[in-house]
Image (cartoon, grey):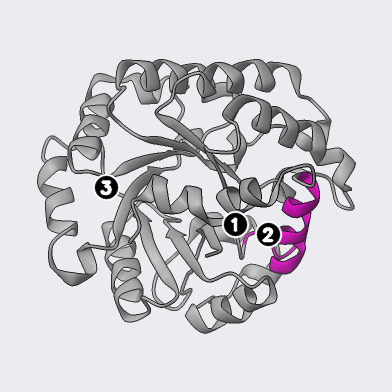
Amino acid sequence: MRIDAHHHLWDVSKRDYDWLKTQDPQIQRTFDVSDLQIAMASAAIDRTIIVQTVPELGETLDMLATAAANPETIAGVVGWVDLADPAVSDALAELMTGEAGSFLVGIRHVVHNELDARWLMRADVRRGLQAVGEAGLLYELLIRTRELPAAIEVAESLPDVQFVLDHIGKPPIADGACDEWADLVTQLAAHPNVACKLSGLVAEAKPGATTADFQPYADRILDSFGTDRIMFGSDWPVCVPHRSYEGVYELAVELLRGLSASELAAVFGLNAVSVYGLA
């Protein structure tokens, strides 16, 4: 089974996406399940994980309802809760109730937008992360190089919480910079409770970037996490201004061309089944 471990859906008629206003006009429109299914077919993807885009419980509830209505397409939901809320455990329990709630597999927050580079290590946030783990969910790290030191500390301090690094930590691919990110991401990968998504690369690169521009970053992720802790993610439709869904999939295949058939099967599906606990 091929699984896309990271994509989004949004409805511009239903809520205000402030971040979307700064994006390419191509994606400043609604993307729904029918759009997703067409895109998935281009790369023969079987099922997906849908991921939050705004810090709103309402969006998480909408994603859960969408997953419940389309279980043949969407295998899981990574939603949002306020980690600093003292009642975060209650919020998680409420999200997980009912048939739709069974699709919740993880929680995410746009950490790289926080002013505090050490936001993840705040006492209230760490308490929230612990609650996520106790609920049987994983936490996805949406961070850049600046926040990697705090991510390393929090992964070490909460060994029972499963973490997933989104977009390989958003390295500065457009600048060709690698050293600081590479050193820190290797330290993060030393913690066995952290997995990584090979996703979001094209959004961090210059227009016209080639496979060679991405290869050093993919190689570092492979060396650091191994093939049993890496998952393919399209980051569709954010990727659309840069490459099509099929184009992003083909890029990942090119970057991993040295892997065996069994290793590719792991990266493009089996690891997601294991990490997210999918049926």
- In the rendered image, which quarter contains the C terminus? bottom left
Query: On screen, 50 above or below 93?
Result: below
Magenta highlight on residue 244 = yes
Residue at image mark 2: 239
Q: Which residues are magenta?
A: 238-255
* Secondary structure beneath label 3: loop
Q: Which residue occupies 45% across, 56% down?
A: 53
Q: Position of residue 10 (x, y in %)?
A: 47, 69
Kind of residue at badge 1: Asp
Q: Label 3: how many residues lie within 10 Å, few (<14), some (14-19) or many (20+)? A: many
**Does the residue at mark 1 contact the one at mark 2 (Cβ under 8 Å)?**
yes
Task: Residue 159: give its label.
Answer: none
Quadrant in the picture for residue 103: bottom left
Q: Which residue occupies 48% across, 65% down?
A: 48
* Left or right side of 191 for 169: right
Q: Which residue occupies 54% across, 75% down?
A: 31
Quadrant in the picture for residue 116: top left
Kind of residue at badge 2: Cys
* Secondary structure beneath label 2: loop
Residue at image mark 3: 81
Task: Residue 235: give its label.
Answer: 1
Magenta highlight on residue 95 = no
Q: Position of residue 59 (x, y in %)?
A: 34, 63
Q: Position of residue 200 (x, y in %)?
A: 64, 48
Q: For residue 244, say whether it is visible.
A: no
In three-dimensional space, the C-alpha distance between marks 1 and 2, rounded to whole angstroms, equals 6 Å
Kind of residue at badge 3: Val
Counting residues from the start of the chain, the first of labels 1 and 3 encountered is 3
Quadrant in the picture for residue 83: top left
